[in-house]
Amino acid sequence: MLAVILAVVAFVGWRWWHNRPPYGPEALAIKSSLQFIGHEEAQAALGDKVNAPVSDGRDQLVLGRVSWQAPPKPLDGGYFAIFLIDKRTNLKPGSFSASSPLQEAVGLGSAGVENKIAERYSWLKGAGDVIEGNSWWSYGSRLAVSDGDASPLTFVAAFPYVEGPLRTVVHVPTAPVAMSDLLLALVYMGPDGQVYWAQRLQG
């Protein structure tokens, strides 16, 4: 019986240590901004090596900047997930362009393990997959940063204008969108899928 109790205590202690954040968001002194811009401004902000999303006159482009100071410890297999979410629909944009001093450290997409974020933080429901009937679907993208030295990060997200019958089947946020509709957040994910913490940056 004693051996069982010791095993349980050891497991609980290991799980606490395993899920314990190496540091909190305050250690990064995160700064951020969002603004609506045109295509030429978007291209200028991203630089020559990254193409801005294609946009016609009715689409909207959102320029975001997120910067942080060097983390106290390397990410070591973890990553920063940066989410831009339309709070009206809890959807993520489908089109992003991003630039960084470490371009190879920035990725675009989604991961099933990030459903844990929505489970833990009700205000970040849009970080997870979308439930339709009895199925889960992954729509839209977030930015993943695998190196803490990839700051500052500049991104442009597209909100396409859709009209007619197509509007009811599009599973990404669409124009028109107001700044008050947008939520920007940074989440620190551990190497084994741990959700260390989430920081609301805008919205």
Image (cartoon, rainbow, N blue to C red):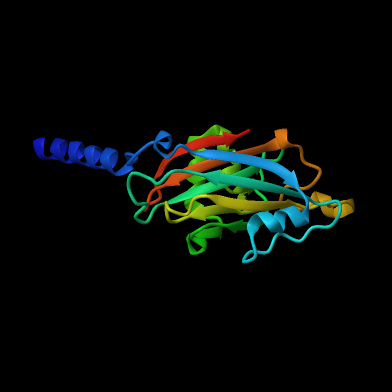
Q: Is residue 57 left or right of residue 2?
A: right
**Number of marks drawn:** 0
Quadrant of the rendering where the C terminus is positioned: top right
Question: Which residue is found at the position 40% from the left and 46% from the top?
Answer: 70
* 123 or 136: nearer the viewer: 123
Question: Which residue is found at the position 74% from the left and 44% from the top?
Answer: 36
> Would you say residue 171 is visible in this rendering?
no
Q: Is residue 145 left or right of residue 99?
A: left
Quadrant of the rendering where the N terminus is positioned: top left
Using the image, determine if residue 60 lies above or below residue 181. below
Residue most toward the bottom?
Answer: 49
> Would you say residue 24 is visible in this rendering?
yes
Question: Which residue is found at the position 51% from the left and 46% from the top?
Answer: 115
Residue most toward the right?
Answer: 164
Q: Position of residue 87 (x, y in %)?
A: 67, 37
Q: Position of residue 144 (x, y in %)?
A: 51, 54
Q: Position of residue 79 (x, y in %)?
A: 44, 52
* 107 or 124: nearer the viewer: 107
Q: Position of residue 171 (x, y in %)?
A: 72, 51
Residue most toward the left?
Answer: 2
